[in-house]
Image: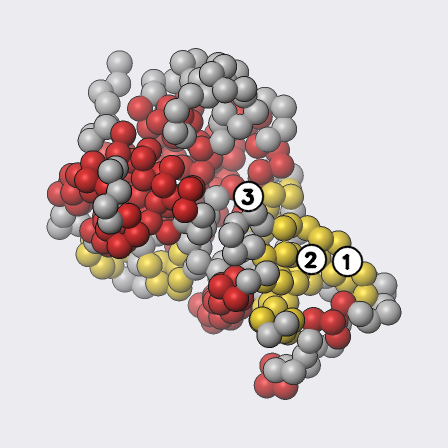
Amino acid sequence: MTAWPDPAARGGRRLEDLLARPDMCGVLMTASKDPDAKLTYITTTNTGAERVAVKIPTTSRAGLAVEREGRMLVDLRRLGLGRISSTVPRYVSSLHVQGRPVLVSSAVAGTPMSVAYHRGLHTARPGLVRADLDLALGWLRELWDVSQRGDAALTWARDTAAGLCGRWDGHPSLEAALSRLEMVEGRMSGLHCTQTAVHGDFWFGNVLVDHGTVTGVVDWEAGSTVGCPLRDLARFAISYSLYLDRHTRPGARVLGHRGLRRDGAAPGVTYALEGDGWFSGAVRSFLADGLTALRLPRSLWYDVALVGVAEVAASANDDGFGERHLELLSGLALRPRRRR
């Protein structure tokens, strides 16, 4: 195993000191397209020592996110992760490059769920979709079980509304979006929710799988050791629905999903939340089953989704992506449709 220096002595270590070593080799795994992008390398030594992930920020703001992730990984280990311990990267070291922090963590095994998602007609096959949703919820339930920190008033809708106002003041879609959150706040009023660790960006691209098992969950920069677990539940459902039309030409029908066309803002999310097909049913069940695990009413599944859309609008790094979700929220129904 590579011998990393004691954390107390790491302050002067440069990224070049690691990557320029003659026994070190690696590959660029991801280069995010966010405005504050990070580059992620997987590196190892020629002797086959432990692989590590090296996350390099491209901006000062990205550097702050990298620092947050390092602290989060340390805090998660202090919680004790039980059976999911092997799925969470372990903090190894901190470096710097051009005055910005660089995070070195253990590299978890597996392939991002997004690889299969975008292959062939994966999302047109009910069995494959339900298997993905079951894997995600199973991992979340394990996280919730090992990180419970008591109950707190469920103020998620109110808190998210404040975030929307702070970011989109004066936007023509804001009033309609806030009216939906106000309705949700009324339906959630008086409820309490177990507080747990929260990933903060729990979408399928951050979930690694191998042979039908979740082997890794990465990118913890938006995480918290204590928060509302409904955030991760909603984020996975919304993101999984968002890209259903990614490989369909504009205006065309999305194969495997009756009534869904690539038309308008985030048609896959609207289809998931307001449709009658098998995919909509799978998403509803995913959200409702998560609520049951948290001892909350299953009937809140639609409200959880609405706040999840609002949270993306309030927090997305990319303004266009955030605005797209604000406009989506403003057009969604105030309450779930009656099913035939």
Counting residues from the N terminus, which is met first, the one under dot 3 or under dot 2? 2
Q: Is residue 297 visible?
A: no
* Mark number displayed over residue 234: none
Q: How crowded is mark 3: few (under 14 residues within 10 Å), some or many (20 or more)?
A: some
User: Where, quadrant-wise, is the N terminus in this rendering?
Assistant: bottom right
Q: Identify the residue under disc 2.
A: 41
Q: Nearer the viewer, residue 264 or 74?
A: 264
Q: In this view, does 203 lie above or below 116?
A: below
**Do the residues bearing badges 1 and 2 touch, measured as CB atoms within 8 Å?**
yes
User: Where, quadrant-wise, is the C terminus in this rendering?
Assistant: top left
Q: Residues within 10 Å of mark 1 (few under 14, many from 20)?
A: some
Whole-percent x and y of residue 43? 74, 61
Callout 2 amino acid? Tyr
At 52% from the left and 16% from the top, the residue drawn is 255
Q: Nearer the viewer, residue 208 or 84?
A: 208
Q: Identify the residue under disc 1.
A: 26
For residue 200, what is the image quadrant?
A: bottom left
Q: In this view, does 190 lie above or below 196?
A: above
